Amino acid sequence: MNIRWFILIALLSSTLIPSDALAQYFGQNKVNYRDFDWYYLKTEHFDIYHPKEYFDVAEFTGWEAEEALISIEESWNYTLEGRITIIVYPSHNSFQNNNVSGGTPSESTGGFTEFLKNRVVIPYQGSNSMLRHVIHHELTHAVMMRMLYGEGMQSIITGISRLPLPLWFIEGLAEYESRYGWGNEASMYMRDAIINDYLMPIDYLQGYFIYKGGQSVLYFLEERYGAEKIGELLRKIRSRRNFSAAVKDVLGYDLEELSERWHKHLKRQIWPTAAHFEAPEDFAVRITDHEEWYNFVNTSPALSPEGDRMVMLSDKDDYLSIYLVNMVTGDIEEKIVSGGGGVYLFEQLLWLRPWIDWSPDGRNIAFVAEKGGEDALYTLDVTESKITGVYKFGLDGIFSPSWSPDGERIVLAGYLGGKTDLYVLDVGDESSLKMITDDKFSDYDPDWGPENQILFISDRGSYLDPKQQVENLWDLDYEHLDVYMYSLDDETISRITNDSYEDRYPQFTPRDGIISFVSDRTGAYNLYMKELATDDTWAVTDVLTGVFTPSWSNNGSLAFASFYNAGYDIYQYKNPFDESRRKQPSLTYYQQVARGIIKDTEDLEARLREITNGDLKDHDTISIEDGDVAENLSEPVQPGSAEEQEILEALGAIPGEDSETEPSIAGLDTSFVISESDRILDDDLKVINSEDLYIITPDTVDVLEDPSISTEDARVDSSVTVVDSTLGEEMVRFVSGSRSRPSEDVSSSYRNHIFYPSGWRGEKEEEILLSDAAQDSILDADGRFIPHKYKLKFSPD
């Protein structure tokens, strides 16, 4: 072989082709703890391989893969040619032992796309929402590879060598598409980077900023130019075969200027709206120091019942380990569980879903670690640093153990066969494990409280039967999580929160009848209290980023983890019940835009300039009052005209969708000042009642019928509706952490949507397709997938 070609191939293998693509050379030596009986099903565009018992997970994957493909194709104006293979593993443990990738995927690897054969490999990890995100993320990679490099090993190797793409673009695009643009989590990372001034230029993005920073760059392009600009950029990359040149052609400036504009854009957005947020150290004492320790993860604090000791999970010594902390002095006393060596060696301690809990007597802790290819529950005597129990149940995964108040039992979340349910165990008896919920919903984060009640979170919505069976999970809203309570005495479930937010980490507090939970209802992840008897809910934090994995002691002190200044640390909150600590958390910039409180100036100004034929000057004021228009409009605008409608839409001054009244300028007292500022407050918001904070806005979703507010008091016409704007009330429009799903203009039937987007053409065609004579049929007579046996003796990977 010519030495030059040998060097080129070696270089491509080591730098340009992901290690996952080299599986056929290295993956054969992995230890496999389970042998699966592989089947596959076919959708319109995908071949999905799955173990026989996990048909439901594969079916869910089929639905979400086709829906993701529709979204990607519409976004990029591209039609996929050929088929894509998806291999679904039942758990992250079995996924780690796959023979597609050369190495062993870490816990933070939610899936991967093998570029050379364009195969997507994903595990189910106990969450329907997480599975949807990973499917969409990895399919973005697969479709982009097909779009830019074509099919076949030679074509892909040649394409990658001639058209290398930066990682921030590859991963940022996958996050942008799978998160529908933007969300609360990504917003948290960018706020922290801007306020603490460590955001690097685009070319130097690394670590998690390859994902979140890249996503932010693409979302900036959407905000500035519209979502269609992303597809235009991809098509230009394909035609120009040069990433930098494509950016210059599409944007009119180079990557360096893009980086500068992106930084300036974020600063102008975040700085003015972040002034009221608190840093964790403003109200709590920091226990760990990721900056001094040069580490990233300090999380899952668990306070002892008396609050004098704490255990936590940290990678301060490179490996994730459990440490014992003296809360009186704040010093680490010892490492009691080592994840990388020492007396107790575990294959892997989990940090993405960590949870450690103390027994009520303050002697033992319970935690989960990987052992022998599956998750195992451990109990450990903290005083003697001795393992007192190891429990393996044959489940695909377990997490979040919580002791009962009497110390005799433990509740935990576990998943098997694509279902995540709650289980109860008698301490000391591995065979006593009992499933207490049994359905397709994701139930986890349990906390055992008084009177045999267990708090947990779930995506079950209004389905309160613990053994509720549903047919098509993909038809339900599984993206939102609420807090629920399970009663062991009568085996019933009651709903504690009912909103469109993401509520996490529910816990019983030391105060009778009061629980706590974390919610992103204002865009940041704050800690809330709720009195069960009255439904009174209030926040006790207003942080810049978020509160995670909180833990209570019996004396009312609280420990929690928070992300701040590029790392996770643990803090002690000594007085969360202090009345002066009741908060009304500030809305993040993203949520202010989502709720229409702030409008993007650049977008608004561009639309107004178009309407006024470019006659709008900086610092001009447009006032619309009593049917009149500003002098700088090119022509008079009559009420009810098309021109008036354009102006109303540009200003955001249009009535809600449910309004039966045509939009009208008359009666609106609205003015906007066009300036260099990057944000504009809606001047059409009028405070009517300062005590209850009612507001008037033309663009609302709900009407508050209050006889005390008259039309005359509101000073608006009937096209304007009234809503309650008090934060936390359900009547206020809220956009969750991710965007709403794109609407589909297709038949609602699952089989029509998946396989034939245009729908069945008639009963005869359907009968022919579903007949025994149909070759390689993909549906049965009920419109469900037909599982096919994978006939080769080795697995599809």
Image (cartoon, rainbow, N blue to C red):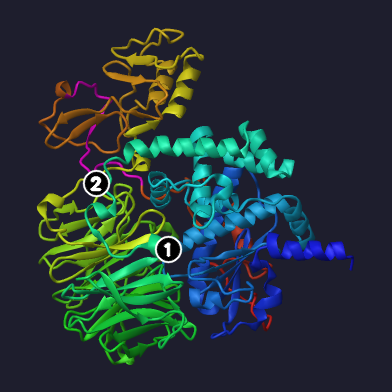
Q: What residue range appears in magenta?
A: 714-735
Labelled pair 2, 1 in contact (Cβ < 8 Å): no
Other-residue count near label 1 (Cα within 10 Å), few / some / many at <14 / 14–19 / ≥20: some
Query: Could one spot residue 757 in this view of the protein?
Result: no
Left or right of 342? Residue 553 is left
Left or right of 108? Residue 574 is left
Q: Which mark is residue 80?
A: none
Q: Nearer the viewer, residue 740 or 303?
A: 303
> x, y (%) of residue 422?
31, 75
Mark 1 — residue? 296
What is the CA distance from the residue labelled 2 to the residue labelled 1?
Answer: 27 Å
Q: Is 354 drawn above or below residue 153 in the view shown?
A: below
The quadrant holding residue 112 is: bottom right
| Residue 534 belongs to magenta span | no
The amino acid at mark 1 is: Phe
> x, y (%) of residue 169?
59, 49
The amino acid at mark 2 is: Pro
Q: Which mark is residue 585?
A: 2
Left or right of 532? Residue 673 is right
